[in-house]
Structures are given as C-alpha cells and as structure tokens.
Image (tube, helix red, strand yellow):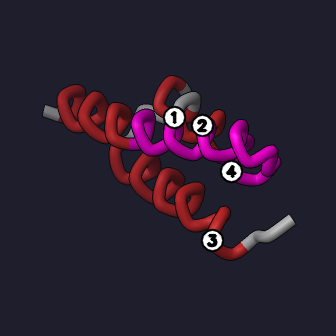
Amino acid sequence: MEGTSLFVWGMIFGVIGVGFFTYGKKQKLTVPLIVGIALFVIPYFISNVYLLVIAGVILVAIPYYVRI
C-alpha cells in the first residue's frame, strides 16, 4: 500500500511542480522555477510517504513566503 501512496503523492507534487516550473519560466521568476524543479524531482529521492508529504507541502509554501 505504501508504494501506491508514494506514487499518488509523487504524481500530485509532480503536477504542482510542473505548474510552478511553467509559471516561473514564463514570468522569469527564479523561486517558482527552482521550487517547480524540486517538486517533480523529490519523489525520486524520498521513499517515506510522510516525509514526502511534509517536504512537498513545505516546497509548495515557499513561493508564497519568499519573494525575490
């Protein structure tokens, strides 16, 4: 069951990451661009569901609080 959860959460964060990446690329903003890349790469490196969700939520929140 954990493999399925990892897959689903990885897909969710991957889709959000593609959205951030596209937005950052079109607007020429570095924070959403880097967060987008990180969001669709982290599921490959984190094999614990809870850590993946925590890391994903933190990464999704970064562009709203960091304005560069």
Up-down: is 21 above or below 54?
Answer: above
Q: CA distance from mark 2 to mark 3?
A: 16 Å
The three-letter amino acid code for the residue at tag 3 is: Tyr
Q: Quadrant of the N terminus?
A: top left
Question: Badge 3: how crowded within 10 Å, few (<14), some, or many (20+)?
Answer: few
Residues drawn in magenta: 13-35
Is residue 52 left or right of 23 when viewed as pictured? left
Give the residue drawn at x 33%, y 32%.
11
Measured Cα–Cα span from mark 2 to mark 1: 6 Å
| Amino acid type indicated by mark 4 | Pro
Task: Identify the main secondary structure in magenta.
Answer: helix
Look at label 1 and name its amino acid. Answer: Val
Which tag, 1 or 3, sits closer to the chain's start? 1
| Residue under pointer 4 | 32
Question: Which residue corresponds to the image point at 40% horizontal and 36% vertical from the top-left?
Answer: 15
Contact between marks 2 and 1 (CB within 8 A): the answer is: yes
